[in-house]
Image: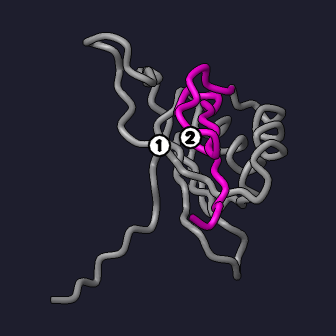
Amino acid sequence: MSSSARLSTVVLDAVDAHELAAFYQRLLGYVVRAEEPDWVLIGPPPGTGGMSLALQTEPEYVPPVWPTRKPGDQQMMLHLDIEVDDLEAETARAVAEGARLADYQPQDDVRVLYDPSGHPFCLWVDSGS
């Protein structure tokens, strides 16, 4: 049975959608596709592939705790995996753009960072294995 459903966009909440959208625009080279006062849709430039990302203002947003340390912590609901060619260079660039390196790094070929709103995301290199 075929489906006409297609995943098109991931939505992240933030205290300030426009601020978080600006971070991901710099990090991913994305462009604004649509915006409203409390919502921004960004995506790859026209003619290139990739998933869109929407950022939504949520005044009561609470950043997740990763890894979860105790019951009652706001748990991570999802994270973004971003493939890069040069892990060290892209990690440094992400930090320069406003990301924060996580204290806990579970793998040598992946870097876990937090965006300015506290969402964990991973930079990774395809090592061919």
Residue 83, image x, y percentages: 64, 57
Q: Is residue 61 visible?
A: no
Q: Identify the residue at image location x=61%, y=53%.
A: 82
Question: For the magenta stretch, what is the residue range?
Answer: 101-129
Q: Tell me which corner region of the image, top left, top right, bottom left or bottom right, holds residue 126.
A: bottom right
x then y, percent, for residue 122: 58, 43
The N terminus - image quarter? bottom left
Amino acid under label 2? Phe
Q: Residue at x 56, y 23 (%)?
A: 104
Residue 59: which disc?
A: none
Residue 40, image x, y percentages:
58, 50
Magenta stretch, overall SS: loop
Which residue is under mark 1?
A: 79
* Residue 88 shown left or right of residue 74 in the figure: right
Nearer-N-terminus badge (2/1): 1
| The stretch drawn in magenta includes residue 112 | yes
Does residue 112 appear in this view? yes
**Decide: marks 2, 1 in contact (CB < 8 A)?**
yes
Residue 43 or residue 40, whichever sits in front: 43
Instruction: State the SS at label 2.
Output: strand
The kind of secondary structure element at disc 1 is loop
